Image (cartoon, helix red, strand yellow):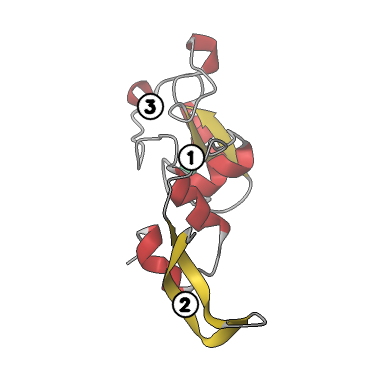
């Protein structure tokens, strides 16, 4: 029984068996949906910096050392969550101190949120195969 179709294949490679040869698959379409359970992205300093492109979310400075800022300060009930943590340079983090961005008169460049799994996958691969690009929403 056929379980998958080849959607894209490498033009220069072939898969050979004893009796047949097939194009070497690059993108396949499964006939049945397979649920991916382990798709939650770990909330870590590394992943926060990756989400924010290693840029301060207040001034876009990318010079290290970069810190993690609680948008709503921890001392005021701010949680360790994707939507309350942003990458910040030392200067901005010190300037903001124990205040909200509004109180400090500092605007966030982007609204922080949990990255989509596909965005995360893209960030893991510095070079993505050309054939995969349309399927990772990169074109
Ligand atoms: Zn900054």
Residue 69 on image: x %, y %: 53, 31
Q: Is mark 1 within 8 Å of ligand 1?
A: no
* Mark earlier in primary sequence (1, 2): 2
Q: Which residue is mark 1?
A: 35
- Residue 7: quadrant of the picture: bottom left
Residue 52 visible? The answer is no
- Residue 90: quadrant of the picture: top right
The extreme right residue here reads 18
In 3D space, how far apart are the residues under numbered discs 3 and 1 (Cα atoms)? 39 Å
Which quadrant is home to the C terminus?
bottom left
CA neighbours of label 1 inside 10 A, class few (<14), some (14 to 19), many (20+): few
Q: Nearer the viewer, residue 91 or 86?
A: 86
CA neighbours of label 3 inside 10 A, class few (<14), some (14 to 19), many (20+): some
Depicted 135 relative to depicted 76: above or below: below
Instruction: Kindly identify the residue that appears in the image at 49 percent across and 45 percent down.
Output: 51
**In the image, which is nearer the foreground, mark 3 or mark 1?**
1
Q: Which residue is mark 3?
A: 101
Instruction: Kindly identify the residue that appears in the image at 57 percent across and 84 percent down.
Output: 14
CA neighbours of label 2 inside 10 A, class few (<14), some (14 to 19), many (20+): some
* Mark earlier in primary sequence (3, 2): 2
Residue 9 badge: 2
The local secondary structure at tag 1 comes to: loop
Instruction: Kindly identify the residue that appears in the image at 57 percent across and 53 percent down.
Output: 63
Q: Nearer the viewer, residue 67 or 44?
A: 44
Q: Is residue 72 left or right of residue 134?
A: right
**In the image, which is nearer the foreground, mark 3 or mark 2?**
2
Q: Nearer the viewer, residue 104 or 15?
A: 15
Residue 80 visible? The answer is yes
* Mark earlier in primary sequence (3, 1): 1
Residue 20 on image: x %, y %: 58, 83
């Amino acid at each position: 029984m056929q379980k998958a179709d080849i959607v894209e294949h490498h033009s220069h490679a072939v898969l050979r068996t004893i009796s047949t040869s097939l194009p070497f698959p690059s993108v396949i379409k499964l006939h049945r949906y397979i649920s991916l359970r382990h798709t939650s992205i770990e909330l870590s300093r590394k992943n926060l910096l990756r989400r924010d492109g290693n840029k301060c979310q207040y001034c876009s400075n990318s010079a290290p050392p970069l810190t993690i800022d609680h948008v709503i300060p921890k001392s005021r009930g701010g949680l360790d969550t994707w939507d309350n943590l942003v990458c910040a340079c030392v200067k901005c983090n010190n300037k903001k101190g124990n205040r909200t961005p509004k109180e400090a008169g500092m605007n966030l460049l982007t609204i922080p949120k949990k990255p989509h799994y596909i965005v995360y996958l893209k960030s893991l691969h510095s070079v993505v195969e050309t054939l995969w690009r349309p399927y990772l929403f990169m074109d």
